[in-house]
Image (tube, coloured by chain):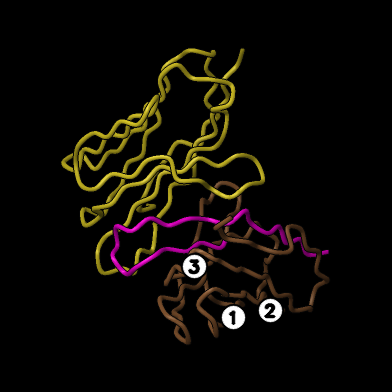
Chain colours: A brown, B yellow
Amino acid sequence: DGGITQSPKYLFRKEGQNVTLSCEQNLNHDAMYWYRQDPGQGLRLIYYSQIVNDFQKGDIAEGYSVSREKKESFPLTVTSAQKNPTAFYLCASKTGSKAGNTIYFGEGSWLTVV
Amino acid sequence: QKEVEQDPGPLSVPEGAIVSLNCTYSNSAFQYFMWYRQYSRKGPELLMYTYSSGNKEDGRFTAQVDKSSKYISLFIRDSQPSDSATYLCAMTRTGTASKLTFGTGTRLQVTL
C-alpha cells in the first residue's frame, strides 16, 4: 500500500544523545516535511524539502538536522542541542510544487527524553 | 497573537448533533484551507480542502470559508462516536512551498 512510514513509533533518549527518526514514502511525492506537535501548540514546521539534495529550515529548526539523499526518504536527527525534544514528530509529503496540492501525514513518532 | 486561532475545547455533544468547529486567521494572503482529523496518538488525516471562499460538502461534512471575515468553519451533521477526535484547521498560500499554518486543534467528544 502507498503511504508514509515513520519509525520508530516510540523512542526514548537520554539527555545528551542524538537520535534519528526515519520517514519513508512510496507515493512518489516531491516535497517532504517534518512537524513537531506539542499539547496546546498545534503543529510547528521544523524542516522541509522540495527536491532531492535540498532542504530549508522551518520555524523551529534549531537543534534539528535533516538530509534528503533520496526522493523517498527524509530522516530527522534530533541533536543534543535541542533543549526540549520530548514531543510527537510528524512527517508529511506532497506531490508537486503548487501550494494547493494536498499534504499527507505519517503516523508519527513519539520521542521522550529520560 | 497567533496567525490562526482555534478554540481547543473540549467540545462534548450527544450522538446525532450538528457540530460546528471554527478557526479565525489574521493573514489575508491565505488561500488554501484544510481540515484534518487526528485520533489520539495518530497522524492527522485530511478531511476537507477548500480553495478561497465558499462552501464544500462531502457526506456529513461541510467546510465553509469566509475570507472577508477571515473565518473558516467545519460542520459535522449526524455526529457519531467515531467522530470523537481532535480537529485541526490548516491554511497556506502560494509562494510558501505549501508550509501549512495550523490551529491548535479542537478536541471533540461525541457521547452516546
Vertical placement of residue A92 versus A65, above or below: above
Nearer the observer, A41 or A35: A35
Q: Element at badge 2?
A: loop
Vertical placement of residue B96 versus B100, above or below: below
Q: Which residue is mark 1?
A: A65
Q: Is residue B64 left or right of residue A65?
A: left
Vertical placement of residue A68 versus B95, above or below: below
Q: Chain of mark 2?
A: A
- Asked whether residue B12 is drawn in magenta, I would say no
Three-letter amino acid code of the residue under disc 2: Thr
For the image shown, how many numbered marks are present on the structure?
3
Q: Quadrant of the C terminus of chain A?
A: bottom right
Residue drawn 54% across the image and 33% down it: B107
Which region of the structure is painted magenta? A91-114
Three-letter amino acid code of the residue under disc 1: Ser
Nearer the observer, B17 or A42: B17
Q: Are marks 1 and 2 in contact (CB under 8 Å)?
A: yes
Q: Which residue is mark 2?
A: A79
Q: Which residue is mark 3?
A: A33
- Asked whether residue A113 is drawn in magenta, I would say yes
Q: Position of residue B104 (x, y in %)?
A: 48, 46
Q: Chain of mark 1?
A: A
Residue drawn 73% across the image and 75% down it: A19
Q: Quadrant of residue A76?
A: bottom right
Q: Is residue B76 left or right of residue B29?
A: right
Q: Position of residue A98 (x, y in %)?
A: 28, 65
